[in-house]
Structure formats: C-alpha cells, structure tokens
Amino acid sequence: MTRCGIAYDLHRLAEGRKLMIGGVEVPFEKGSVGHSDGDVLSHALLGAAALGDIGTHFPDTDPKWKDASSLIFLEHTRKLLDARSMRINHLDAVVICERPKLGPHFPAMRHVLAKALGIAPEQINLKAKTNEGTGEIGRGEAIASHAIATLEG
Ligand SMILES: [Zn+2]
C-alpha cells in the first residue's frame, strides 16, 4: 500500500541562534527559535514521514530534547517506520524564507538527511522559495517548510 503524509512547520528567527536546516548549519545572522535545534525542514519531513506530529514522539515539554539535533528525530522516524514494515519511497519539501539563499546547501542537506533516514539522497527533493517580501517570512521573522512523504508498506 502507498501512503502519502504531508506536514508543515514554522519557526521564528532570532539573533543569537544557529540556523539549522536539514541537519546542516547555514551561515546567517539569525537562527530558528525552538525547543530543539529548530530545524524546520527536518521537522516537516518528520511530520510527513512519521504520519504523525513531532510533538507526539518528542514533546517540547521534555527537557531531554532541549537543543537536541533534529537528526535524532529522523533516526527515530526510521525506527518507527521499520516497526510498521514501512519504507520511504520519496520525500519532497519546500523551505520558505526570504534569506539566505538555500540552493547551494541542498546537496549537503540531502546527503545528511538521507543518511539519518537510511535512504538515498536521490529519494529526497528539496526546493527553496521566498515569500516575495510579504508577511512574517518576508520580513525575515520566520522560516517555514512544507513536506510530503510517499511511503510504501
Ligand atoms: Zn519545528
């Protein structure tokens, strides 16, 4: 059976935080605010692939996950899928931010994400989009990501 999962995530951006996206630190003057490392792309992928909410498995009230690498969540997702005899066929995601330019970082992100999920980089497609200067994202106050996962099993 083929199933599709969709997810959306958004984090506020603030100075004094690292900007972690897809398990890769992207040099920028701001970073995402979150209980974990605030990795908006990993969270969207997790939500889509795990067919559930990140908070179900990693509640942000648990001090264990404070500043945790979101790659740990993806490795856990892989275990959840294994337990259900399901596997990831394909992941597609778009990251929405006004700056910085993400395209140059996508090859590294695909590599890191694929390793954490136990799939090939070719099974992950990443795109970047600005918000055309509008709203919170356009003002550089937030970063968002939409992801869709195609699962077999
Ligand atoms: Zn998140």
Image (cartoon, rainbow, N blue to C red):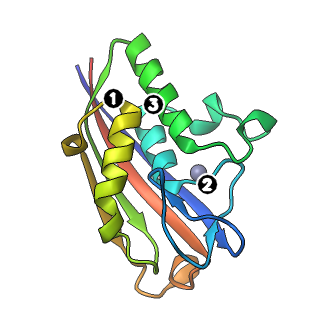
Cβ of disc 2 within 8 Å of ligand 1? Answer: yes
Residue 45 sits above or below residue 64 on the image: below
User: Of marks 3 and 1, which one's residue comes earlier in the chain?
Assistant: 3
Q: Amino acid at mark 1?
A: Gly
**Point 54% across, 76% down: residue:** 28
- Hey, which quadrant is residue 117 in on the image? top left
Q: Amino acid at mark 2?
A: Gly
Q: Where is the C terminus found, in terms of image quarters?
A: top left
Tag of residue 79:
none
User: Of marks 2 and 3, which one's residue comes earlier in the chain?
Assistant: 2
Q: Which residue is mark 3?
A: 50
Verify CB contact (< 8 Å) between mark 3 and mark 1.
Answer: no
Nearer to the camera, 6 or 32: 32
Verify CB contact (< 8 Å) between mark 1 and mark 2.
Answer: no
Q: Amino acid at mark 3?
A: Ala
Tag of residue 38:
2
User: Of marks 1 and 2, which one's residue comes earlier in the chain?
Assistant: 2
Query: Percent x, y for residue 47?
Result: 48, 40
Q: Which residue is mark 1?
A: 118
Q: Is residue 62 visible?
A: no
**Point 61% across, 62% down: residue:** 11
Query: Percent x, y for residue 135?
Result: 55, 81
Q: Residue furthest left?
A: 122
- The label nearer to you, 2 versus 3, is 2
**Point 37% across, 70% down: residue:** 102
Query: Percent x, y for residue 39?
Result: 55, 53
- The label nearer to you, 1 versus 2, is 1
